[in-house]
Image: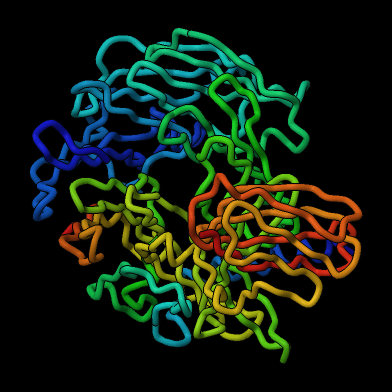
């Protein structure tokens, strides 16, 4: 019985994983607010240049491999583009103010460099 | 990523060649192009962009594919050069390979090879110093890990073997090296188990001695970050982890817990933060502690369409800066009391000691936690109605006293104690 449950869950994860690459969210993105957590700042990776019938400007971001680098009050991060989102490959390099979360600059590298 | 001597941001990555050799892993050296980008860190202006193949000039013109660091290889900065280390298979035998590259990715000198003593599952290569690496291999026959200290050109310095590992050693994955580089955190997650029934954290010293462990039974998630684990003489791990629970009306509630685990007592929940939208939750995947008791946390924002159905198109990558005081100060501190129906602490405030009075005979553990959630004192008692606890060594302030009965017939009781 446990094996059957595992198989169903495995299939569910596969289906969700595949579908996650092909559609907009059911409701527009909003931040997850945890009552009492009170983050000093909370920022979401966004590129409004990638708003299509599949992408909402948020859901093509994926965690990048390099560890973030913190240097002189800045945090540098790398996020990959979900390469199944379409003919888009590449990564975002972002620089934020570590104290405020303010996005100082963002650079998209990859096939579709701009 | 690193900042160079000219204060420029260097980003080094590997790009998969297309087409690549399908007989080999797409992440091996032969199928990758090194790419190095240099930015002005202040304004993001791209100053240089090197990408070429160091064996085949024609690869320069191949289509660029996914920009990422290959999972099965590592690139390290070595003075002005780059050190590339990966595992390769030659005639059914695995070797570590080390190659020195110039900043454009061109190979400099010869390759070095070091034969594996044992096979590995994850490629765990840890850099301790510019001239010292450790490669972790698995001895399946003995259920142990082998720590192999090697130079950049793969000369072996020393080896150490861990004690026998109770769980499956091949699923131990290197997570982090402590700031003092004396402790190594590994985590065990069976990613083929959809329920993540058993997650384990282990910390070894550099000579492969096990310093501490915690088993996270019935964990139900592979998303968590370890906030605290490095402190000497502290056998606990502090985790930030999401969870989905049901409230009294059987409705879904998304929460984020700050929990302390140790090998003896399991989980102690310091704090629970509830999502204002029960269908939205965050899955943390990376944390960097900062010097001023703050934590930089990256996580995936996820949404469900209903209690059980995930919204397939809803996923975002976010980051937060969290204050340790908010994380560790129990949000329900005001609700904690100095007196429960079964246990009383007096005097409170206390000076050098206090007494716990039990309504009925008590057998179990008494723990004193700082308000930051760190276990400071622990005492096991048996068949007592009254127990004196010496707190002379503690600083003035507020503490949490937790009593965990060994028979589990009643729930643990947490009291608030003030030391003057």
Q: Identify the coloring.
A: rainbow
Closest to the observer, B112 or B379: B379
- Residue B298 in the image: state x and y as whole percent: 40, 59
Q: For residue B138, which quarter of the picture?
A: top right
Q: Where, by quadrant of the figure, is residue B168 drawn?
A: top right
Closer to the camera, B30 or B307?
B307
Q: Position of residue A58 (x, y in %)?
A: 35, 72
Residue drawn at the location 19% of the way across and 29% of the way down = B104
Q: Name the residue: 66% across, 61% down.
A: B401
Task: Using the rendered image of the protein, determine whether residue B312 is visible from the camera's viewpoint.
Answer: no
Q: Determine whether, in the image, residue B365 is placed left or right of residue B254.
A: right
Q: Is residue B274 above or below residue B118?
A: below
In the rendering, at what x and y percent does residue B399 appear? 57, 60
Residue B288: give x, y in percent of width and height.
39, 50
Q: Is residue B367 above or below residue B120?
A: below
What residue sits 49% from the left and 19% below the top? B96
Q: Residue furthest bottom?
A: B249
| Residue at 33% from the left image edge and 38% from the top image edge | B14
Name the quarter where the N terminus of chain B is drawn: top left
Q: How many marks?
A: 0
B151 up-or-down from B420: above or below: above
Q: Is residue B150 visible from the viewing direction of this image? A: yes
Q: Of A90 and B184, which appears nearest the observer?
A: B184
């Amino acid at each position: 019985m446990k094996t059957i449950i595992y198989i169903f869950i495995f299939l569910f994860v596969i289906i969700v994983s595949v579908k996650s690459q092909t559609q907009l969210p059911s409701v527009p993105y909003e931040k997850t607010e945890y009552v009492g957590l009170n983050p000093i700042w909370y920022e979401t990776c966004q590129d409004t240049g990638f708003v299509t019938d599949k992408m909402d400007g948020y859901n093509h971001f994926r965690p990048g491999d390099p560890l973030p680098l913190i240097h002189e009050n800045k945090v540098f991060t790398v996020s990959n583009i979900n390469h199944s989102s379409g003919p888009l490959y590449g990564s975002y390099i972002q620089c934020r103010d570590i104290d405020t979360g303010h996005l100082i600059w963002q650079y998209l590298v990859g096939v579709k460099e701009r | 990523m690193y900042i160079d001597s000219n204060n420029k941001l260097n980003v080094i990555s590997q790009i998969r060649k297309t087409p690549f050799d399908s007989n080999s892993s797409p992440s091996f050296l032969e199928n990758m192009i090194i790419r190095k980008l240099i930015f002005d860190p202040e304004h993001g202006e791209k100053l240089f962009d090197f990408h070429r193949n160091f064996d085949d000039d024609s690869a320069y013109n191949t289509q660029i594919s996914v920009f990422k660091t290959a999972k099965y290889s590592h690139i390290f900065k070595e003075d002005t050069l780059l050190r590339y280390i990966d595992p390769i298979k030659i005639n059914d035998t695995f070797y570590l390979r080390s190659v020195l590259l110039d900043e454009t990715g061109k190979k400099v000198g010869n390759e070095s090879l070091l034969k594996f003593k044992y096979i590995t599952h994850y490629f765990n290569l840890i850099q301790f110093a510019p001239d010292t690496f450790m490669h972790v291999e698995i001895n399946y026959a003995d259920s142990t890990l082998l720590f192999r200290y090697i130079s950049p050109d793969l000369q072996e310095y020393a080896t150490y073997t861990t004690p026998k590992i109770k769980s499956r050693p091949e699923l131990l994955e290197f997570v982090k090296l402590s700031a003092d580089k004396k402790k190594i955190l590994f985590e065990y997650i069976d990613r083929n188990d959809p329920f993540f029934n058993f997650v384990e954290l282990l910390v070894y010293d550099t000579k492969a001695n096990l310093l501490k462990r915690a088993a996270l039974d019935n964990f139900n998630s592979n998303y968590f970050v370890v906030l605290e684990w490095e402190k000497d003489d502290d056998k606990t791990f502090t985790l930030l982890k999401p969870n989905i629970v049901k409230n009294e009306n059987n409705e879904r509630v998304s929460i984020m817990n700050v929990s302390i685990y140790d090998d003896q007592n399991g989980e102690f929940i310091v704090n629970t933060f509830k999502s204002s939208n029960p269908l939205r939750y965050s899955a943390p995947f990376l944390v960097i502690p900062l010097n001023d008791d703050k934590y930089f946390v990256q996580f995936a924002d996820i949404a469900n369409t209903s209690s059980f159905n995930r919204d397939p198109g809803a996923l975002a990558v976010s980051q937060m800066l969290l204050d340790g005081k908010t994380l560790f100060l129990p949000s329900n501190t005001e609700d904690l009391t100095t007196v429960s129906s079964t246990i009383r602490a007096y005097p409170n405030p206390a000076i050098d000691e206090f007494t716990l009075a039990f309504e009925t005979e008590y057998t179990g553990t008494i723990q004193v936690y700082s308000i930051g959630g760190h276990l400071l004192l622990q005492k096991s008692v048996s068949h007592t109605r009254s127990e004196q606890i010496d707190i002379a060594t503690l600083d003035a302030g507020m503490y949490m006293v937790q009593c965990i009965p060994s028979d589990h017939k009643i729930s643990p009781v947490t009291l608030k104690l003030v030391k003057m």
